[in-house]
Amino acid sequence: MKDLTCEELLHYLSDFIDNQLEEALSEPARHHLATCQNCRVVLDTTQKTIDLVGETIRRSIPAGRRQQLFNDLEQTFLNSEKM
Amino acid sequence: MSYHDDDQLLADLRKRDPAAFRWVFEAYADKIYRLALSLLENETEADGVVQDTFVKLIEHLDRFEGRSKIGTWLYRVAHNLCYDRLRVRQRDEHWLASNQPDNGDGENIIPATFVDWTNTPDLLVDEQEIQAILVDLIQSLPLKLRAVLLLRDVEGVSTAECAAALNISASSAKVRLHRARLQLREKLSLIMADTLKPEGKTR
């Protein structure tokens, strides 16, 4: 099994996180992560960052405004001409 | 009523079925809002983009060729409308050069911070503070990276759909996402390292 360098692992990090890493690289990647503390931390903190981004950003259009927006658009939709 | 099939959705929208419109609004309004908000950093403008995007959908209903999925089409329209608004801002002579958002391709970051801050009880900041920090950090990302981060990691859009929506190659989408994630991680790690409780640091 080929050993990955830290640089190589970093290059493939996103694919690894997304489960899109090609099979031949998966085992070397897991092996490197099991033996390299720094890369392990980079993986964990990247995953955590992604999770936090999701939680932080997933806001909706403010409720009052949302209803108004929908009503206006629905009117436009219903009034638009069918061909 | 749920639509798994774009053809059926389109057919119902063309019939001006209110349930179909309600569905597409519920499915995409917030997502478009979030994309616009991340690029324009202004709630009123983001709201405007949502309106304009759905109006375009309504106008195009009868001409829609169905070559792309409706969702992808909506993201693409919204993204283009955001850039139209950004260009309008740039024409405003009072808009200082320093206010222009970075529209570069981002750069590769070599991690230099290896503090493990993932165990949140070890941190002195609470969730709200982390979120506020993160919003600022995301706004500091170049626009091109922000758009991909939002579509992929917030909205869960696939690489292929993201590439189609932004009119870029799949490999560009992957590179931009990778850079966005690593840049954010790096900046966040620097801040988080400073917020670890003393006991946390000795591990």
Image (tube, rainbow, N blue to C red):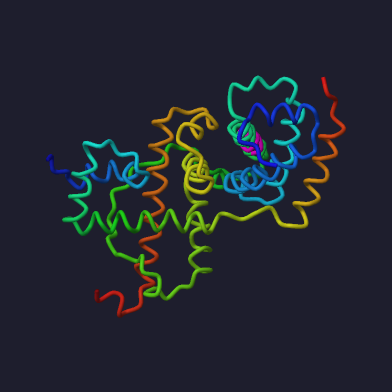
Q: Quadrant of residue B108?
A: top left
The residue furthest bottom is: B199
The residue furthest front is: B1
**Observer able to see residue B107:** yes
**Residue in the picture at 83% in, 23% down:** A82
**Residue in the picture at 65% in, 19% down:** B65
Q: How far from the left and from the top, in percent, is residue A62?
A: 71, 56
Q: How far from the left and from the top, in percent, is residue B47?
A: 71, 46
The stretch in magenta equals B80-85
The residue furthest right is: A79
Q: Quadrant of the N terminus of chain B?
A: top right
Q: Is residue B172 left or right of residue B139?
A: left
Q: Closer to the camera, A78 or B53?
A: A78
**Residue in the picture at 66% in, 38% down:** B85
What's the magenta bit mostly, secondary-structure-wise? helix
Q: How far from the left and from the top, in percent, is residue A17?
A: 35, 47
Q: Is residue B41 left or right of residue B168?
A: right
Q: How far from the left and from the top, in percent, is residue B8?
A: 68, 29
Q: Quadrant of residue B79?
A: top right
**Residue in the picture at 12% in, 40% down:** A1
Position of residue B119 relative to residue A75, above or below, is below
Callout count? 0
Q: Is residue B83 magenta?
A: yes
Position of residue B166 relative to residue B184, above or below, is above
Q: Is residue B110 magenta?
A: no
**Observer able to see residue B143:** no
Q: Quadrant of the C terminus of chain B?
A: bottom left
Q: Closer to the camera, B191 or A26?
A: A26
Q: Is residue A68 left or right of residue B153?
A: right
Q: Is residue B131 left or right of residue B73?
A: left
